[in-house]
Image (cartoon, rainbow, N blue to C red):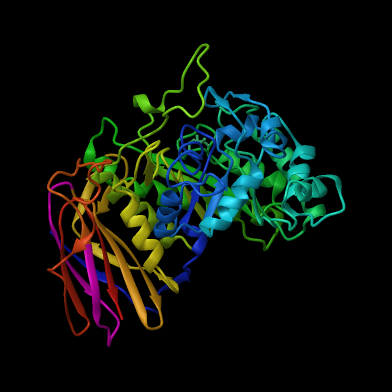
Amino acid sequence: STARLVMNPAFTVGPVRRRTFGSFVEHLGRCVYTGIYEPGHEKADEDGFRTDVLELVRELGVSTVRYPGGNFVSGYRWEDGVGPVDQRPQRLDLAWHSMEPNTVGTDEFMTWAGKAGIEPMMAVNLGTRGVQEALDVLEYCNVPGGSHWAEQRRANGADEPYRVKMWCLGNEMDGPWQIGHKTAEEYGRVAAETARAMRMIDPGLELVACGSSSRSMPTFGEWERTVLTEAYDQVDMISAHAYYWEKEAGLQEFLVSAEDMDRFIAAVAATADTVAAARKSDKVIGISFDEWNVWYQDRTPSKPPTGDDWPVAPRLLEDNYTVADAVVVGNLLISLLRHTDRVWSASQAQLVNVIAPIMAEPEGPVWKQTIFHPFALTAAHAKGDVLRVIIDGSTIDSAEFGPVQAVDAVATWDEAEGAIFLVNRHETDTVSVTIEVPAGCRLTEAVTLNHDDPRWQAGPDDDTTVVPRPNTSAALDGQTLTLELPAISWSMVRLS
Ligand code: AHR
């Protein structure tokens, strides 16, 4: 099989946004407790945060981190998580049928965010709560002093406000599983009123309304239209969430999952623009793709406890990723980057232990899942502007999407440097790729992640057998770059 690609710095989509490389920390399973936070661990710092996890977070290149949920936030009382730790109540977390000790709350998260060098993105509870509680937590976080909650924060040791810019107005309110689930009309009203009031405290906020929990939701499309009709003037972005996993249709179909993300983004953008047109508004609503990943939702690790069992930090959603999963994750990042004109923020769900690139064993080591690598390299080397890459090559016949290109790619260009990120999504065939690159470039690096067994998984004893390795087939002759992409592979080529 073959593919011909054109990379031209004139085909600019928009800037590479650091916020595309966001992640997500939810009070779920072992993401917080024995994930980012484990006071008894030998690598824990003076605040109880695992320094080995922090090192990997930095290496991953994460920009923003969404917190504290997720489904969790729709039953969360943020006040439980501030003030003297020994006076904080234990609460039932209904979303994950777990016990929440509240040892980590807003101040601890902000301390961790400072150490990790990330921008916090906060979510408010619009499930069991409403406008007032959203205002309270905003006041606690962003008001310098003088008012009740601002002074409480100062009394709790944080003299300076956190000045959190991005706020999610609830989480997945379209989902019947959500605590306090609402119709689009109900949610649209409360989102608009919460946003309007929050801006009275801090006009500069960037506010995200809940879009759909997936493109396959029965309310998809109509939900976005209704919510934005209510809240268009009050919000900046609408969210999108998408999880992919190999289903009965098989591996080949799973490998082209990014086609769904492309269509999802296009449909949400079109819906938002339809609302704008009807309102005669010039304002553009962005997309916050604030949950995306591979997640085997049908497998045992995703099933919460039941009955009288309310454990603290149980092992939940601890998916162990394959090489094929890493190729899909790399492709989802290609899709997000390609839509940088519309996707203004994104968060891979989640960061540690829970459907995560980073794993941390309690009282044990950290290790990297296969999906760590495409994320880390894309975050490190995507710079400057995103370029649309034109692709003409062998296709795959997808049952869901029809004929789709076997190779998918996006490029970035930053005056002196360029990078091109590619996947070969074909289950069995190597693809010989020819890329027309800008004149005067040098080939500085070409790496590929693949394995004879696409179901190979990393683990605590081995996370180095499959990592991106030099692709020795890559060669540059004038403006013609050639390289071989093995079946089920992710690659990065750098030029300067
Ligand atoms: O990321 C795991 C869960 O997936 C989140 O809590 C929820 O928002 C989504 O359904």
Placement of 428 over or under 18, stated as above or below? above
Examine the rendering and report whether any part of residue 168 can be seen: no
Point out residue 315 in the picture as x, y percentages from the top left corner. Answer: 41, 29
The N terminus, quarter of image: bottom left
- Asked if the stretch drawn in magenta spans residue 428, the answer is yes
Query: Which residue is at a point 60% across and 39% down the rendered structure image?
Result: 104
Count of numbered badges drawn on the protein: 0
Residue 355 part of the magenta segment = no
The structure residue drawn at horizontal position 31% and vertical position 74%, both measured from the top left corner, is: 7
The residue positioned 37% from the left and 38% from the top of the image is 361
Above/below status of 333 relative to 191: below
Q: Residue at the top extreme?
A: 307
> Taking 99 as reference, is 156 left or right?
right
Q: Position of residue 82 (x, y in %)?
A: 70, 39
Q: Is residue 69 left or right of residue 6?
A: right
Q: Between residue 67 and residue 461, name the one nearer to us.
A: 461
Quadrant that contains the C terminus: bottom left
Residue 445 seen from this side: yes
Compared across the picture, whether 379 is left or right of 17 comes to: left
Give coordinates of residue 327: x percent, y percent.
28, 50
Q: Residue furthest right?
A: 146
State which quadrant residue 185 falls in: top right
Which segment is the magenta one?
427-447
Identify which residue, 300 or 340, lies in the foreground: 300
Q: Position of residue 191 (x, y in %)?
A: 71, 42
Q: Does residue 73 lie above or below 289 as drawn?
A: above
Q: Quadrant of residue 244?
A: top left
Which residue occupies the foreground of this view, 64 or 8?
64
